[in-house]
Amino acid sequence: MKKIKWAIMGTGTIAKNFAKGLQSLEDAELYAVASRSIASAIQFGQNYEAQKYYGSYEEMVRDSEVDVVYIATPNSAHKDNILLCLNHNKPVLCEKPFTLNVKETQEVIRVAREKNVFLMEGMWSRFFPIMQKVQEWIDADLIGPIRMVTADFGFRREGEPEERKISLHRAGGALMDVGIYPISFASWVLKKEPICIKGVASLYETGVDELSAMIFQYESGQLAVLSCSINTPTVKEARIIGNKGSIVIPDFAKATSATLSIIGEEPVTITIPLEGNGYNYEAAEVMSCLRENKTESNIMPLSETLSIMASMDELRRQWGIVFPTENQA
Amino acid sequence: MKKIKWAIMGTGTIAKNFAKGLQSLEDAELYAVASRSIASAIQFGQNYEAQKYYGSYEEMVRDSEVDVVYIATPNSAHKDNILLCLNHNKPVLCEKPFTLNVKETQEVIRVAREKNVFLMEGMWSRFFPIMQKVQEWIDADLIGPIRMVTADFGFRREGEPEERKISLHRAGGALMDVGIYPISFASWVLKKEPICIKGVASLYETGVDELSAMIFQYESGQLAVLSCSINTPTVKEARIIGNKGSIVIPDFAKATSATLSIIGEEPVTITIPLEGNGYNYEAAEVMSCLRENKTESNIMPLSETLSIMASMDELRRQWGIVFPTENQA
């Protein structure tokens, strides 16, 4: 099988993680790396054995050898970076948060569909093997009809917070950085859009949210109770509660195990260790789609990315958070 | 020490539990029981060895031997029952929910203060010994400044729901039945009123809430994430999250253990079994106050009962739930 040639845009921590992830995929090759700084591109490219190093994104997308681009640039650059790739007919996997708002997401989806080019949000943990197990439990009706989903992702770092996490200009904050995980998780479990969204957020002095809680209601009466923080060591757990039992996923945003508790039965815990560092799973999904000439993933479809972004827009509206760099209606 | 003579108003399950609780207190005596049905009063009184059985509440409160009344009547009767006792200068412990709304709570507090008679809400689990341990951990700053409180109380009963739990006329629903536990817990931990309350609720066909989620925000940026249900088997856990660690209380509404997790240290679990069936603790607090001639408990003060009721009013306002029997502004 011909190897698929990846290019990575950006050279930060997550770009490095993704490059490592590709190394565990036989049919993937890290072909090129692009940075606004050629020095960064060279260093990254040498470390991860890329063939090509580009000091500009524009040069990279003109390389006809590039099969697909992984975008790992700052949040506020995603939309322009995606458009650049699509306009050069390059399939795109873009790190979450996909763009800054619904308008930007609509724009890139429109272009992807016009160009008939593959586009996917890089919600990496959705593709982990344990999530398939959880889906099987749900599909087998082991916990009965789902009534409530809870999910939390918060962390605390000692010392000063990272500038990009708290910068309003760079579209930081808990919601954009980690809140998207619980929101995406609820969407993945319930497979529909909320009819009512309410949130409260405590804001950092820079104007981004540092600790947030969100409650979503769905047409059939289901609820999602979600929370996130960039300065609080919260539980990082997800829970799917049905009439007959529940599924608990510890560290759900990077999950390798899940516990099924059916009322009246002993709980069962399944652990499925990662092969590779975890980033390989989303990359494998992208390559599988490309080999099948699909322009969207069934697991992370664009309509769902748009719906998740709409929830985030509504929360920011309630919290009065506007990013200076976002392209508004 | 002279025994304190209790009268119990109502003969339902919780009245029975309370009568059992009194049996484990040396200085307490179940003196009288009152029901609207003399037959019920006699049966209850004989089972729990009361001296007097009354077929009306009015007769009971005129008995000069009664030192204090425990009210375990339906929610919608609490206000009138409290007023009847206070107007006969009988100290009162009233089962939660204390009354149906703020207006009713304000009225009974006003009368208690005018009459200078003891009055307390029967939030029984607040008085459990493990809660003192949790308070010690918080006071010793072991988890650092508190950032978030989560608490959930939901259950599912097989078969048809109990009529009183789902009746709008009887002021049923998840919020009034069990939602008060997480709300009271957050109040107990944070010792202040929320500045913002948002809730979503799924309503039963009778018009009461069956599954609800609530998020509270406090002046210092703290959040509470609370949920409750009368038809969903949720986690029933409370969690207090600070900057340096967290405290988890399983089955927090009837807790006998708690786990302290300080970041970087091994978690420590403390278990303090109940002496008696648990109802004895709130009864002991009432008797301690009476012996000290106090008209309020420091652990469950009336100002806090009022604040909790205000939160519940606001939630019902958001959900459009009005009880036909409640005395509104």
Image (cartoon, coloured by chain):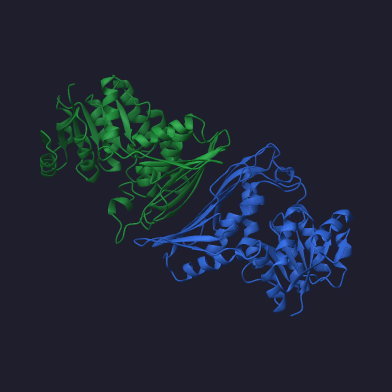
Chain colours: A green, B blue
Left or right of B325? Residue A145 is left
Quadrant of the rendering where the N terminus of chain B is positioned: bottom right
Relative image position of residue A218 (x, y in whole percent): 54, 36
Q: x, y percentage for residue B206?
A: 71, 39
Q: Residue furthest top?
A: A293
Residue nearest the observer in this picture, B269 or A191: B269
Q: Quadrant of the C terminus of chain B?
A: bottom right
Q: Residue at x 29, y 33 (%)?
A: A281
Image coordinates of residue A94 in percent, x first then y, are 29, 35
Residue B94 vs A183, above or below: the answer is below
Side of B153 where A125 appears, left or right: left
Q: B89 or B37, which is in the foreground?
A: B37
Which quadrant holds residue A104? top left
Is B278 drawn above or below residue A124 in the view shown?
below
The x and y percentages for residue A72 are 25, 39
Q: Is residue B306 left or right of residue B234?
A: right
Where on the picture, by quarter, is residue A63? Answer: top left
Q: Is residue A93 visible?
A: yes
Query: Would residue A313 be visible to someone looking at this image?
Result: no
